[in-house]
Image (cartoon, rainbow, N blue to C red):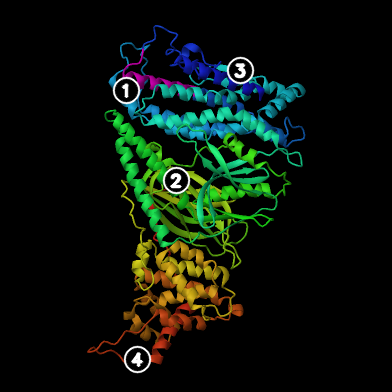
Amino acid sequence: MELFKEAVDYLETQHILVEAAGGTGPDPLEDDVFPEEDVFSPLQTDSMDLPDTPVLRTLEEMLVRRLMVLRTVLDSEKIYLNELETLLMPMKALKATAGTSQPVLSSQQVRTVFYQVPELRDLHRDFYTCLRDRLGLLGPQIHPETDPGQGPGKEQGQMGFHLTVGDLFLKIVSQIGVYRGFIDNYESAVEIVRRCTQTDKRFRILAESMMFYNGSDKSKTEYTFEALLYKPLDRVTKTTLVLHDLLKHTPQTHGDHPVLLEALRLSQSFLSGVNEGSQCKQEVTLSRGMRRQLMRDGFVVDVCEGGRNLCHLFLYTDLLLCTKLKGGAQGKQAQYRFCWYLPLAGLKLRWGPEMERTTDTHQRIHTMRAKMYVLRHELRQIMKPVPLKSLAARTSERGRKKMEHLELMFLTQSPFLPLELHSPSGKSHTLVMSSLYELEEWREAIHRLTRDNIETVPPDLLTLTSSCVKLRMTQQPPLHGILPQSEEESLCGTLSVAIHSACGLQQPASVYVCVEVDGFEFYESQAQTHSSVSSLSPHWEQEFSFQVDGAQNLRVLVVLQPEEEKICEGQVLGKTSIQLDPSLLQKRWRRQTVSLGQVVVSLSLKYYPHPLDRPSLAPAQQQRIFCMPIGAVAQQEGVLVPHVVRCCVEEVERRGMEEVGIYRLSAATSDINNLKTAFNTNLREAVSRLRCVDVNAVSGILKLYFRELPEPLIPTELFQSFTKALDIPDLSSRSVSMLSLLQSCPSVNQNTFLFLLHHLKRVSDRQDVNKMPLMNLATVFGPSLLRPPVAVLGQSSPAVDISQEVVVQVQVVYSYLQCDNLPAAQTCLAHDTATCDSD
């Protein structure tokens, strides 16, 4: 750690000297492995100590020099990635030997030596790939020093102004907290390497001769293990100088300038705070000799006394600390104000269904979405590389501030997924989040620490809160709306997601799938399937469509439906994030299987790029489903069996198959009316309510749906035909006639009827417990599913006794329930497999 402190002190001294002299100092990318003549250093040609250095007077020259800095960064990143790959090469072999009788390193030692190195590799690989792709769009590099005939021209300058990379630098600097774990662990890793090098000949041979191969000239460089371990420390200390130099060659009117300024501020804050942060961590020792360390932090919404506050939550090894960020904008020093803390010992966590939203809340959220959409559109127009005017720059800055204010409001008002925290002392707090994926990550992180029943030392709250500025890994709320983003790397249009099935469950269970898409929050970004019936291989065949802008990742979670009726909290069985590639998904279904731990989900994706319409100022009103033609409801949902039927049937099969008198006994009228209102206004809310209400209310709302259809499920015009079919004495001929009549029904009616029949047969299979044989079920459903024609004045129709009508209604349904060769029901419109790719 002393070595790292010396490096930071040296770089801070260089930075002060550079600013005093008006130059940029030594090349921040210079490294021992770089031959000086092979790497162009823009910093070495700008120093004020060199009298022959040309002064950059024109915008075009400035932009060309900026491109040279970026290409130098790219070259340096490539070498650094190769060094990290070289460092990771022996990890797999060392892990394998750890489980043998003669290990080179123990499992714990392997984890310590390579701690955070894979994460650093992934972080920089993503940065390198994105930067390479963007620079690749500009064509070959032109060096004014080596190509005097070319020189910095207008074409290079204009192309350079089109190029935005600030978001890439801000993204990697925002995740620079990954280095903190590596820095804290560095001395332990080096100690293991040195000790094993002295005591184990096998490791010594490995540690003293690690080869790094240069891809261009196929040459190789030999490193020691310890030298490679130092590379990340060397790299992170140069970040500030790299950003400082890039800013020097970025015009203030360029869209990257404010973003790079923020990245520079974050980088300087990290470097200046890492030493103090390390000291803060060492100051607090827990009762069992453990140090209090920061494990995770991030921005969440704290609900307190009906109000909402956007807070910064810090998870330490023994406690949760909630703070509120003050300042930190426009170069001001950030400060934190203490809100509350909870010890982790005995802490209980609970998350449940979404909190209910009032009409006013819906309206406010949609208004904010519409305003953010309009403002971002205006910012895009301003940022177009037309003439560089100071007025445009000032307008852009005002727009960015307004966008930031709107996003902060939206981050505070939009989350409705609660995570309740209950301490043994009686203190409780509720956090709300907008993403189930994020909520589960927090829950997992807290649960890992609470299960050990940690003994705690009462914290010095003032010192702990003050140290948050230095310790934080998350520098700012996720305000992605103000950042430039490459349209080639994200989706803008309609993303369709079809959830097919899952496998890998350890035992039969009722589960559902949640889907979340990232990007700008202008449209709804989450959906979930209905709960499956209890099964080892659940099927859903549900399709969702998202309007997306800037989407890059799709998150998928499988959630276990709780068995107890009064518990609305589920258990996440697995989760994963899928990177969206626009080139692979455009205009055709692509089927793939994704692993979520032990559970594997089969899904299909399709993307159709197109300009997006402005979000409505008013929340979209869901079309009513009760008292509406079943064909219209199914068409609206894009299915063959309406969601209300599927959800109710599967909920009954989940927890009502052994309920005595199911479908015969009634529930409270208020419960049924509340469910009806929910289905008519918010399907997602209705599904959540289904899981918590009395199961007889679930069966009651299903019967009510069929009873209130304006046209019965079995068309009225077939009533007389069914009456005649029932008179056929031969059972086989009667069955053929009945099935033929069913085939003449519309597709939605036919499949919904078959879906219901198969369900009722399964209910009857448990008649020894629920006391509902086939005849009882036919008696309950017959009058709702089939109705006689209504007599019209002036028209003659066969006179049918009312009691006889009821007999026909019951006998028709009973006859179908007795059929052993009922066709299977299709619940969803089949995807066009001819145009569907599979992974």
Pointer 2 residue: 408
Of tags 3 and 1, the one toward the viewer is 1
632 or 391, which lies in front?
391
Circle 2 sits in a helix, a strand or a loop, which is it? helix
The mark that comes first in sequence, 2 or 4, is 2
Of marks 3 and 1, which one's residue comes earlier in the chain? 1
Q: In the image, is 769 to the left or to the right of 553?
A: right
How many angstroms separate mark 1 from mark 2 (CA)?
36 Å
Which residue is depicted at the point 53% across and 54% down?
303
Relative to residue 285, is residue 52 drawn left or right?
A: left
Q: Which residue is more in the foreground, 358 or 526?
A: 358
Q: CA distance from mark 3 to mark 1?
A: 40 Å
Where is mark 1, residue-wise?
A: 157
Q: Residue furthest top?
A: 51
- Residue matched to label 3: 222
Residue drawn at 33 percent across, 18 percent down: 61
Residue 820 in sight here: no
* Residue at image point 32% right, 26% down: 159
Please, what secondary structure does the residue beneath circle 4 have? loop
- Residue range in magenta is 55-76
Which residue corresponds to mark 4?
Answer: 800
Is residue 587 found left or right of 331 in the rendered image?
Answer: left
Q: Nearer the viewer, residue 514 or 830?
A: 514
Identify which amino acid the numbered label 2 is placed on. Answer: Leu
Real-space CA distance between mark 3 and mark 2, rounded to the nearest whole angstrom: 50 Å
* Labels 1, 2: front one: 2
**Front tag of 2 and 4:** 2
Give residue 250's position: percent from left, percent from top.
Answer: 38, 24
Q: Earlier in the sequence, mark 3 or mark 4?
A: 3
The crowding category of the residue bearing disc 4, from other C-alpha atoms within 10 Å (few below 14, some 14 to 19, many at least 20), is few
